[in-house]
Every structure is written in structure tokens, then in C-alpha cells.
Image (spheres, helix red, strand yellow):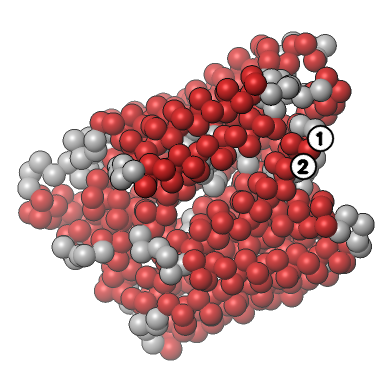
Amino acid sequence: MNYLDYIVIASYFLFVIGIGVRFTKKAGKNLDEYFLSGRELPWWLAGVSMVATTFAADTPLAVTGIIATSGIAGNWLWWNFLLSGMFTVFFFAHLWRRAGVMTDVEFAEIRYSGTPAKILRGFRALYLAIPINVVIMGWVTVGMAKVVNIAFGWDQWQTLILLYGITALYILLSGMWGVVLTDFIQFFIAMAGSVVLAVFAVKEVGGIAGLKSGLIEQFGENHHLLDMSPFSPKLAIATVLVWIGMQWWASWYPGAEPGGGGYIAQRMFSAKNEKHSVLATLFFNVAHYALRPWPWILVGLASLVVFPGLDDSELGYPKMMVSLLPNGLLGLLTVAFLAAFMSTISTHLNWGASYIVNDFYKRFLKPKETDAHYVFVSRIAIIFLMGLAIGVSYVFESVKGGWEFLLAVGAGTGLVYILRWYWWRINAWSEISAMVAAFLTTVVLKILGISGFAPIMIWTTFVTTIVWTSVTFLTKPESNETLFSFVNRVRPGGFGWRKFSTTNQSEKLLDKFWMWIAGCVSVYSFLFGIGKVIFGEQILGFSLIIIGFISGLFIVFRFKKL
């Protein structure tokens, strides 16, 4: 890098700090402003913030590593989550906004009652805010550290001190306002940087034709790296069946929780109303799965040709940055990675602090303090989480390893998070037993030496499902008073609430089911249509894109009717 690159990076840092200073007073009014932007966000701002948060510095590196071992089809590890994401759009987004809570953990005490609800809320708040949230930030930091080490030659400590310091500064000042407004800019910077690098990468290997011939030269005629089908020979059939048939509904994962939740739910709570909540979540799923992956995939494939045989294949992405981009553009793409990293970390710091303060400190320790006091404690919680995340980042060597660890720990819990909205019999012990069973089963399987992602997912889901269903029927249901209160507040509809509701909304649920199907068809058609066009199969590619448009028009028509 030269002085021009450093000027670009320094300008970006000054910009985000400026936003933090600008919104300090507004964010400091109360917890609603600090954690939910006063529930005033339009759908486009909330939606872009969701997309920016899920574009972390680790994501392109993880995609590059996946392609090196499993080809394009390996991305079904996360592409399957579109099925869960579209479920959230049409079945849960409006319900989350209607619930009027500050966090998804607070939901426990409007859906359940008594001591079990308190235990669930307090335990889940600390569980998600500290171990789970910190683990996520840890592997995100690993991805960023790899990029900065290649670009600057800095060690991990220098990277962490600088990036966490600047990110924490503007989030401490501006809360959620700083998160979403910087997310909006960061998303476009990160996307522009990804596209620019993809253009340079494809040009370096001689265009798409050169990329294809280079892959054949490296891996032979039958390399299958360009297969997009989940049933590629590069993938074990058991793993594929777990991804498509189980993972998306059975496993909890941040940003793709069955039934919604986490920081995605936080954006729904921040939206102006139910309509904006639904549209924001729909935009997120379209942009996340259909628009964003291909620049990463192209760079990942090109890196296999330009840097064959890397011990750590994830390093192929930053190496392509440093070797291909001229001064100025290298600084711009480094800013793109900084933007991706900072948008994710800022969200996780703010989101985790919301659990600690709203669902533990305020709920159980200091329930009658002033708004200024709670905002002050929120800032202390952010500093606390930042320190933990820096320490945990040294545990992970592989980004993909972090993904698979979290999927396994949450296996089997997803169905509970879906059914609690639509079946009255689910109670607080259902959730508690599911979380405990999933964690303990994963640990026991590791101790017994069972390896492989698919076997661990299958066994954990099987055991967890047996445990929570047994516990549900062995414990008392929630009181009629609690259930009537929930139905009147949220109005979920469906057969599971017939005895507690005077209206039958099963027909609307059927409409939403068809919209879910159309949404999945639309996004997958765009995703694979774009890919086919890129690799020269224009007729098939454009046919898929047309199917995507038709499915999208169906959604628009049905959405207006509903």
C-alpha cells in the first residue's frame, strides 16, 4: 500500500466516527433510541442494514475456502437458509413487529408465564449475548485479521486494537442509529469493492474461458468445481440431505433463525410498522442470496488458478486483492473489508448489549433506574463484549469451522422456535429443554469421537427433538390467561390457536405458504440464472431469470391482496 491507499482508509474512519458524534444525543435519550432507532426505520434502511451485517469480513474468505474443497455447490451450506429466511418474511416478520418487544428474548415473557418464563428469558439473554455472540465475533475477527495481515503485514493484536477501538467508539456514542446509518454506506462500499475485485480476478485468468481452462489444467476435466446443484459429486449425499432436508428448519443460526430472531428481529422491531418489517426482511433475503454471492465465487475460483495449493485456501481472497489491485483501488477494497467487518461487529456489540441490559440487568437487577442510567450501562456492556471477543478470536483458525460449530450447537431447536408462534401447547420448558439438549448432545458426540458435520447434525437434531417433545407433554401448558393475552396481542392465527381465537385465519396462512414457495423459487432462479449467464449458458440462465421475475410478480400481487 502507498499513501493514497492510507488516505482512502483514514477518510473512511473519520466518516464513521463523524456519524457516531452526530447521533450521540439522539441515541442517548432511552433504550428504544439506543437499541431500536426509536422504531422509526423505513424498510429500505432496515433491509440494507440486515444485508450489511451479514456481509462480514469472514464471508468472502469462507466462500473461497468452501469452493476450494467443495466447489460452488458447497455454498449450499448457507444457501439452504433461504428456505428459513423466506419463512420469516411471510410468517413471522409482521408478528415480531406486532409483539412490540425490544429483543426476541423478551418475547419469552409475553408467550409464557411464571418462573419458567423468567428463567428462559434470563438464561437465553446471557447465553446469546456472551458465549454465542462472542464466538461469532471471534470468527469474524479471524477473517478480518487474515485480510489485514496480507494487506498490511500487521499482526492480529494491531488489527484488533485499531478496528475494535474505532467500531466501539462510534457505537458507544450513537447506538443503533450509528449501526444502521453506517451499515447503509458500508453495504455499497463492500459490494462495489467485491465487484471490482471480481472484474480484476476474471481478467487476470483470461476471462471466463480462461478460468474454465485454468481449472481444468489444475484439477482435470472432471473437477465439478462449477456444479451448482446440491447433488454435485463434490458433496457427500448425507451432507446434502442434511442441508436441504433438515438444517434450515432444525438449527438455530444467527441471521437465519427458524421463526426469525436475533439481530434480524432487532431490525424488524426497529421498522416503522408491520409492512416495513416484512418488506425489509424480503429485501434482505433477495439481496443476501441472489445479488451478493457471485463476485465472491468468481474471485474464489480465480484464486485456485492464480494461487494453487495454498495451505490455507481462505487466504486466496486477500492474496488476490494485494496482487491484482492498483494503488487507490487496493485501499478502496480494504475499506470495503473494513466496512464489512465493522458493520457486523457493530451490530453484534449493540445486539449483545441489548440482551444484557434489557433482558438481564433491567429485568432482574435494577428495574427502576433512569433512561440515562440504562444507556450508560449499555455502553459499559459494549466494552465488556468487545474485550471478550478479542480474546475468543484466538481460538478459531478457520471461519468455516466456526459456522459448523454454531450450527451443531443449535441443532434440533429450530422447530420449537417455529411452533411457539402457531401451537398453543409449546411452553417455556420446551425451549429450555431444547437448548440444553442440543448443547449437551453436541458435546457428548464430540467426546465419543463422532466426527463429520452430517452425523453430528442428524444425531443432535434427533435427540433434541425427542427431549423437547417429551418435556412439552410431561409439563403443564401455559395458563389460558397467558395464551389469550398472547393471541390478542400478536394475532398469529392458524389451527393451533382455534380454541383461543374467535377468528379462523387458516386461509391467510395458506396464502402465505404459496408466497413462501414463490419467494424461494424467485430467489433461487435469480441466483442460478445469473450464474448460468456468467458461465456461458445464456438460454438456461435467462430462462431462470424470467422465472424469477414471474415468481416475484406473484408475490407482489398476493402481498397487496393480504
Specify the amino acid type for callout 2. Answer: Lys
* In the rendered image, the vertical position of residue 330 relative to residue 562, given as above or below: below
The residue nearer to you, when weighing 62 against 307, is 62
Q: What secondary structure is marked by label 2?
A: helix
Specify the farthest residue to the bottom. Answer: 3
Question: Where residue 122 sits in the image (x, y, percent)?
Answer: 72, 48
Q: Viewer-proximal residue, 397 or 530?
A: 397
Q: Is residue 198 left or right of residue 267?
A: left
- Between 432 and 264, the one lying in front of the other is 432
Which residue is identified by label 2? 118
Residue 88's quadrant in the figure?
Answer: top right
| Residue at horizontal 38 percent and vertical 41 percent from the top | 445
- The residue sitting at 34% across, 43% down in the picture is 448
> Which secondary structure, mark 1?
helix
Mark 1 to mark 2 CA distance (whole Å): 7 Å
Location of the N terminus (image quadrant): bottom left
State yes or no: discs 1 and 2 in contact (Cβ < 8 Å). yes
205 relative to 151 in the view: left or right:
left
Q: Which residue is mark 1?
A: 114
